[in-house]
Image: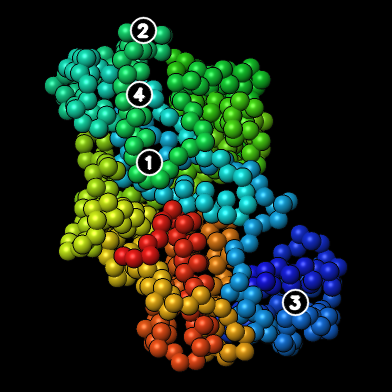
Amino acid sequence: MGLYRIKDDLAIQIRTILDIDNQFVIEFEYPNSQFGDLAIPCFAFAKILKRSPQEIAYQLKLALEQVDYIQEVNIVGAYLNLRLKTSYLVWNTLLDTPAQLSEEQRKKITLEFASPNTNKPLHLGHIRNIAIGEAIYNILQSQGHQVIKTEIINDRGIAVAKMMLIYDKFHKDEVPNVKSDHYAGDLYIEFENKLEENPEFIDEAQEILSKWENGDKYWYDIWLKLRNWVIEGQQQTYKKLGTSFDEHIYESDIYKQGKEIVLNGLDRGVFKQHSTDNYIYADLEEYNLPNKILLRSQGTALYITQDLALLKYRLSEKSQCYNSDNLIYITDFSQNLQFQQIFAIAKQLGIKQEGLYHIGYGLFRLPEGKMSSRKGTIVNADPLIQEIEDKVQEIYFKDTRLEQSEIEKRVQIIAKASYMYYILSISTKKDIVFDINSSISLTGKTGPYILYTYARIQSILNKSGITPKYFEDQDLNPVEKNIILKLAKFSEIRDQAAKEYDPAFIAHYLYELAEMINSYYHSNPILKESNLESKNNKLYLLERVNLIIKTGLALLSIQTLDEM
C-alpha cells in the first residue's frame, strides 16, 4: 500500500473516527514536501461537526497514533501532521501500482473525436484531436471506466458536392494515382482554384447536393465512390496514429432525422418560429446563451440540427454508446459556443439533462500562420509524419549497423513519441505552434528525451545481471526519498489528468521524473556499488521508475524502446 492507497485508507479511517459521510472528500497536504509527511487541515471538518479544529485534531491524534504505518502524530494549530514510517512507505510505494476506482465510482463514458470530413485527408489538427482523444481514453480506462470511442463521419454537404462536381467535369472515371484521400483533397482544392473564373460552379454544386439528397442515382454513385476512397485513405492514417473506433456513424444516415426532432419540438412548444422570417429557433435566454436557429426559413438544416439527431441516436439502444453516464466531445475551441447551445437544447427537449461535456482545445498553428483547406495551405498529417520520420532517421540512425526492419521500427516509435509528447505536453486549453526540430530533440522536454531515459535505465539494469529486490534495513538518502515520493504521486497525477481531461499533467510529471532519475544515476555509479544490498535497492528503484515511465508513456499512446 503506497502513499496513494495509504491516503485512501486514512480517509476511510478518518471518516469512521469522526462519523462523517463516506462521500466527504478529505484533502491532504504535503508540508515542505518532506518524504512521508502528510498534513490534515482539521478546519475542513469544523463546520459539519460544529466543533473546533483543535478538538477534532486531538480526537484524530488519539486514534491515528495506533495505526501501524504512522510513526508520529503532532497537532500544529488547526492541522494534524502525520509522519509515516519510512520503511513501510518505501517498500509499499515501490510495490504499488496505479489504483483503479471502486466499482461504484466507475462509469460508462463515450468519447467522440476525430470525426473527419470525406472531402480531404486528415490534417495537422486531426493529429492533435486524435492524440488528445486516445490519451483521455487510455487514462479513463486505466481508472476502470468502460470507455466507448465513437466518431461521426461527415460525408455530406456542400464541400463534398464541390469535390463531386470537379471529379465529374474534369476527372470522370479516373482512379487515384496517389493515396486516395489526398486525391479527393486535390479535387476540393481544384474547385476553389477554378471558382474565380467559374462562379457558376457554386450554384452547380448546390444543385448536385440537392439531387443527391433527393436520391439521384447518378450522383449517389459518384458520391459513394469518392467517399469510399477517402475513408480508405483515412483509415491508413488512423493505423499510423494508432487509433480505432468502436462505432462509426455517418452523417448521411442521420441528417434527415434532425429536421424531425426540430419540427416535433416546435409542435410541443419547445422551439419557436420567427414571426416574419419563419426560421425555427431555440430560445436560450434562460441559459444566458444566444438563441440558435435550428431550421432556416426554406426548411434546410444546419450543423446543430444534425448534432441533435446524432445525440439522440447515441442515447438510443441502437448505439454502442447507449446508457453512457458521460458523453464527451473533443473538438477545437471554436465550437465551444455550439456545444453549450447543444447541451442547453438537449435539456429543453428532455433528451439528456446531465453528463454532457465538451473539451475545446486550442488550435494547432504553424509558424506561417493558420491553416486553410480552401486555400490549400493545410498541412496534411501523412507528409508531416513522414517528414518527422525522415528527420528522426537522419539524426538517430545515420550511421548504424542495425537491420533495416529494426531501424524502421525504432524510427516509427521515436517519431510518434516526438509529435505525441509535443502535443500532449501542452495543455489542451492552449494553442500550439508545432516545431518539428524541437519535437525530435534528445534534450529538453521532449518525447525522445524520456525514451532515452527509459532506455538508459534499462541498459543499467541489463548490465547489472541482477534481478533486484529491496532490502528494508538500508538507509535512503534524501534524493532517493524524493524520487520515491514522486513515484507515489503517479496515481494522483493520473486522476488529476482524468478529472480535468488534460493529459499534460502526465506529460509534465514524466519529464520531471526523468530529470530526477537522470540526475540521480549520473551522480551515483550504481554498477560500481560495492554494498550488495545497497546496490539491489538502487537497481530496484530504477526498475520501479522505469515501470512508471512505461506506464505513463502508454497512457499518452507512446511505446518505449529498450535501446535507442
Task: State the image coordinates of residue 149 (x, y, percent, origin top left).
Answer: 52, 40
The quarter of the picture where the C terminus appears is bottom left
Q: Quadrant of residue 421?
A: bottom left
- Residue 365 x/y as whole percent: 30, 50
Give residue 489's quadrant in the image. bottom right
Q: Earlier in the sequence, mark 3 or mark 4?
A: 3
Q: Residue at x 45, y 73 (%)?
A: 513
Q: Which residue is mark 4?
A: 228
Residue type at mark 2 is Lys
Q: Closer to the camera: disc 1 or disc 3? A: 1
Toward the viewer: 332 or 15?
A: 15
Name the residue that disc number 2 marks: 217
The nearer-to-camera label among 4 and 2 is 4
Is residue 57 at least partly visible in the picture?
no
Instruction: Please tell me whether residue 307 is drawn above or below residue 483 in the rendered image.
Output: above
Residue 213 drawn above or below residue 38: above
Between the C-alphas of marks 3 and 4, the distance is 63 Å
Which residue is identified by label 1? 239
Q: Which residue is mark 3?
A: 42
- How many residues crowd mark 2 within 10 Å: few (<14), some (14–19), many (20+)? few
Kindly check if marks 1 and 2 are in contact, taking CB atoms under 8 A apart as contact.
no
- Give how far apart the Cα atoms at labels 1 and 2 are: 33 Å
Q: Evaluate whether residue 514 shows in this view.
A: yes
Q: Nearer the viewer, mark 1 or mark 2?
A: 1
Q: Amino acid at mark 3?
A: Cys
Q: Residue 523: percent from the left, percent from the top?
A: 38, 87
**Among numbered discs 1 and 2, the one appearing first in the sequence:** 2
The local secondary structure at tag 1 comes to helix
Closer to the N terminus: mark 1 or mark 3? 3
